[in-house]
Amino acid sequence: MTEVPARTSARRYPAARANRALRALAIGAVVLVGALSLLLVQPAPVSAAPEATNPSVEMPDPASITFKARLTADADIASATVNYKILNPDGNIGGTLKAEVVGGRAVDAAVTLQTNNNDRYIPTGTQVTYSWTVTDKNGASTTSKEETITFLDGRFQWLSKQEGRVSVYWYGASSANAEVAMRATLESIVHNEELLKVKLEYPVRVVVYRNSAEAKPAQRPRAATFDQQIVTGGSRVATDVLHIYDPLGGFEDVARHEAGHIVTKVAGDGKVSTLPSWIDEGTAVYSQKSVGGYGPALQRAIQTDQLLRIRNMAAPSNQPSQVDIFYGQSWAVVKFIIDKHGKDKFAAIFKSVKDGAPIDDALQTNIGMDQDGLYNAWRVSVGLKAIDFPPVPKSTSIAGSQATQPPLGIPTSVTSAANTDGTGGGVSSAPGAAVSTTTAAVVGGGTLLVAAALGFFAMRMMKKS
């Protein structure tokens, strides 16, 4: 009998070899997954954040503020900006200034904010906050701690004193005038709070210049002809800042007058309406101890019947010959309202305007007459005849007071800093590091899928075998 060789061993040999290959493939997939897991848990490299150190400001005159800082980074510096805010009780206004940097890892940066030009007016005495945001070429960024300064005229060495809600700044041998101005401001605030039945909730800063010539660069520019004929004794230059430029016979009444404007704004200026200048300025003059030179000018105007129609006094006169008449008549009409109708009715007029009523409606509601009716009632009280004015169409617009300089004209666009909690010092990771982490995750996910597919294929082949 012929024996036939068994084929079993011949058929199993290739199968065993395939099994070993599949096991190796599965083990390789497991090893690949483990190695990749170790790779993914390694943190992506992050560049050290840049720094802005030794922040400082220079204020050489009333026209500019220069911000300076030392900038350092592990990579070349790509950009640096100053984030500034002008603090104001009515709402802070801010923006950013981009400093010029030419690269390098250590840079002394400086950038200047113009404070008195056609674009903006930031008066001396204003409080300003600022911080630096620095970014390097890798995208690492930091924002420094916020600093606060009081903007003052760098031409002079300033001294200061505070009492209660009022801080006063002066230079040279003006300490006596500064003391008088501070006392007068405090007294006027209290007087007008009681008169208008409001409360001033924020502090006030008073900047006292020695004379109008030295103060001129700190004022908003005006027409040359007007400046030659009219001396401005002072001004409410911001919601919480007063300037005293010239004593005009005494710092006391100048300070009382300007402090009166601080309180009239609180009492009568609303979101959609503001006081006409005649009642704003009249109340400020009413705050003075003496009417001063406005009195004689008013008497001459009464004698010659050269008075101003109240309806035309929504803004101060820009005619030098009428300025004293404007202030004197405004004071006389305010005094007439208070004497005839009482302080409560007078305060109610302010409240009505603040709540949104046009001045004619506010007067009609509280004392039963509009501006023309008030003008005629006052004319009769000084011995003049009433004037028959034609009816005035009801207006939906409200004329705004221009008794004092608008506080701030600053662009409101602001570039956000990396840190948004207001404390400064925030650091953001470099964009390059974030991209590396994302890429690793994508590659890792794809590799895991491939490894899983290989493992699954290997297991299937092993079962079949």
Image (cartoon, helix red, strand yellow):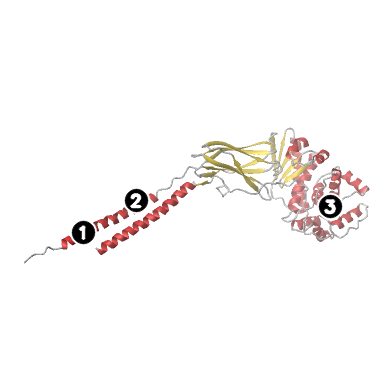
* Residue furthest out toward the front: 2
Q: Amino acid at mark 1?
A: Pro
Answer above or below: position of 167 versus 345: above
SS state under label 3: helix
* The quarter of the displayed image where residue 116 is located: top right
* Residues under numbered marks 2 and 1 in contact, where contact means CB atoms less than 8 Å apart: no
Task: Give the CA separation, mark 3 to mark 2.
Answer: 86 Å
Q: Report whether residue 209 is seen.
A: no
Residue located 56% across and 38% down the image: 101
**Horizontally, is 157 left or right of 252 in the view?**
left
Q: Earlier in the sequence, mark 3 or mark 1?
A: 1
Disc 3 residue type? Asn
* Viewer-nearest of discs 3 and 1: 1
Q: Nearer the viewer, mark 2 or mark 1?
A: 1
State which quarter of the image contains the N terminus.
Answer: bottom left
- Return the x and y of residue 461 as percentages of the image width and height: 27, 62
Identify the residue position indicated by label 3 in the image. Answer: 312
Q: Position of residue 163 (x, y in %)?
A: 70, 42
Q: Which amino acid type is shown beneath numbered disc 2?
A: Ala
Foreground disc of the pair 3, 2: 2
145 or 405: nearer the viewer: 405
Tell me how far mark 2 sits from mark 1, CA to CA.
31 Å
User: Which numbered disc covers residue 14?
Assistant: 1
Q: Is residue 344 left or right of residue 86?
A: right
